[in-house]
Amino acid sequence: MTYRPETGSIPESAGVYRFRDENDVVIYVGKARSLRSRLNSYFADVHSLHPRTYAMVNSASRVDWVTVANEVEALQVEYSWIKEYDPRFNVRYRDDKSYPYLAVTMNEQFPRVQVMRGSKKPGIRYFGPYAHAWAIRETVDQLLRVFPMRSCSKGVLVRHQRMGRPCLLGDIGKCAAPCVGRVDEQEHREIAEELCRFLGGRTEKYIRDIEKQMAQAAGELDYETAARLRDDLAALRRALARTAVVLPDDTDADVIGMVADELEVSIQVFHVRGGRVTGQRSFIVERTVDGGEDELVEQFVTQLYGDDSEHQEEAGVPQNVIVSQLPPNVEVLTSWLSAKRGAKVRISVPSRGAKRDLLATVRQNARESLAVHKLRRAGDLTARSQALQQLQEYLDLPEAPLRIECIDISGHQGTDLTASIVVFEDAIATKSEYRKYAIADHQDDLAAMREAVTRRFSRLAPGSDEEAQARRRYRPGLLVVDGGEPQVNAAANALAALDINFIAVCGLAKRLEEVWLPGDPDPVILPRRSEGLYLLQRVRDEAHRFAVAYHRQRRAKAARASILDDIPGLGPARRKALLKHFGSVRKVREANVEEIAAVPGVGPKLAATILDAVAQSGQNGGINVTTGELLGNAEADERATD
């Protein structure tokens, strides 16, 4: 409130604003359709803000703004300011520089094709990125037969200019040899332009032209030229075989898949030109301020296409931008992209067909990339040590929690409750210590929490047989529960009833990633980028995964049994034999009477009864799924168990 501007001084027009800290450093840049409405939202009730937004507002000491004519100009100014100031609370989507690109140096007298890494430079056209540098070199080796341009270094070029004779590539026809004047500067540049157009996705034209020239040469009995063109055609097709055909030939699109958790965002971009995936880019960034996936999509698209580089034609704005969620100001963003491209651009969310399937693949790549990133981070010994030290400090523990256990309660609409317990020692999962419990007597989460804690830790109560043995190993130093204040208090009360006072308890609430302590009405807010919060999140997510897997297993078992249990004459032994023979109730329904009667212990009469029962259960809306289908229905189970 110390720097809140007067409401009447804030214009109602569109504009861009900057939050600055006490050193006058810009820490956040944003845009708004109405500056007054947007800025007032930051100060109306700061305690209702998301923790990330609250941290930004609390770190600032003043805010200023500029007005613009419309929202498109606001988008342009916002991007330029983010690029200029690099504010720490704005997400900056930077390329993963570990990927190699195929580059054509159009800024040289004789352009060169080569492998390049690092930041992009003006005057150079980039294609890719590729997963491996050797893949680029093999592709170039095939293309140089058809587009014989320079691939040597500047030193080699100068040396052969002085010698007056070409290198080996010039002798075998994989270089036009501009070093000795076989082609002039303009002719060589045209070869480079042709290669760029081919790499940019315009492949069918060259294939058709070469096929036509080959047929014409063969018709004129010029078999030597026809054979050379045949080999050129084979080389082009081998190069094209490295890129998958995923969409119709005339499709130019960028497919953007995004997966986010509370701390980080993983993004994958597939560049599709001429229906083929010509490149892939990967981004993983930390979330700095609050915002849904639609806002993250808008931020990313703005920064992805905001660079006015000379390789805009190949790596810039395509005709179609395919996303998982439409950004909030899709019309403004579309107008801005269309102006940059010089032609109409369409931003869409596919609902069916090949584009939807490709988007699902891209999102899966993003999800796996985030998982690999987290595993790599978890394997860092320094980061693990720092995480344990931070938990000791933030939670006011007497010592670092070398053994952390986490409990998660899972259920379906308050029924069939289960509990899972995962164990981390030295910040690494110890799966041999995992436990799972079926909660039979309670349909309440808090009662289930108390039962799970009691069953788990009664062995460590003073005077128990395992208590002395546990002292010689890691004793649990911290118990994490998935939930807020009620769940934390329930777990703490259960430990107190067991007279266990050496295990600290905390809860991690998923919505805001708040850490709750027993008896404390206010949560502890750990720094968003702290290794301690990251470790708590990883422990909580692992407990949730383990709980969901166990709950699905029980539901699958119940699904198999519920249909067959009530069939007269079908006892436990015959049910077991039937499921062992067919594998699932679905397969039983698909069988005929003779096939069911072939199961040991099942005759024709009982087989007919079984077939009628399973068929009727499917018609009446009964449980009619296989174990594999239950295990695969991840999205529905996530909602049910949450």
Image (cartoon, grey):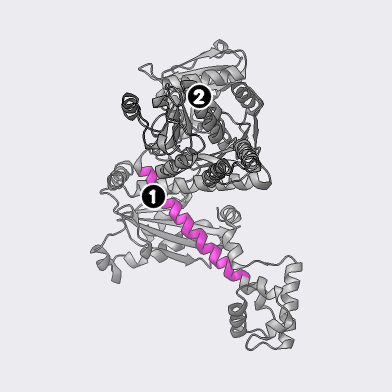
Q: Which of these two is toward me, 300 or 612?
A: 300
**Which residue is label 2 attached to?**
187
**Which residue is label 1 attached to?**
375
User: Left of 323 or right of it: where is 387?
Assistant: left
Task: Identify the element where label 1 is drawn.
Answer: helix
Label 1 crowd bin: few (<14), some (14–19), many (20+), radius 10 Å: few
With respect to residue 284, does 164 lie above or below?
above
Q: Are marks 1 and 2 in contact (CB under 8 Å)?
A: no
Q: Which of these two is toward me, 92 or 497?
A: 92
The amino acid type found where label 2 is placed reads Glu
Q: Determine which quarter of the picture holds residue 516.
A: top left
Residue 125: percent from left, percent from top: 48, 28
Calculate the distance from the C-alpha at mark 1 to the C-alpha at mark 2.
Answer: 51 Å
The amino acid type found where label 1 is placed reads Leu
Label 2 crowd bin: few (<14), some (14–19), many (20+), radius 10 Å: some
Task: Identify the element where label 2 is drawn.
Answer: helix
Magenta stretch encompasses residue 540: yes
What range is drawn magenta here?
532-559
Residue beneath the point at 70% across and 67% down: 622
Residue 293: percent from left, percent from top: 56, 37
Residue 573: percent from left, percent from top: 59, 85
Q: Nearer the viewer, mark 1 or mark 2?
A: 2
Magenta stretch encompasses residue 357: no
Query: In the rendered picture of this protein, how many numbered marks are placed on residues?
Result: 2
With respect to residue 446, does 79 lie above or below?
above
* Magenta highlight: main SS: helix
Residue 274: percent from left, percent from top: 61, 38
Residue beneath the point at 56% across and 48% down: 361
Q: Determine which quarter of the picture holds residue 38.
A: top right
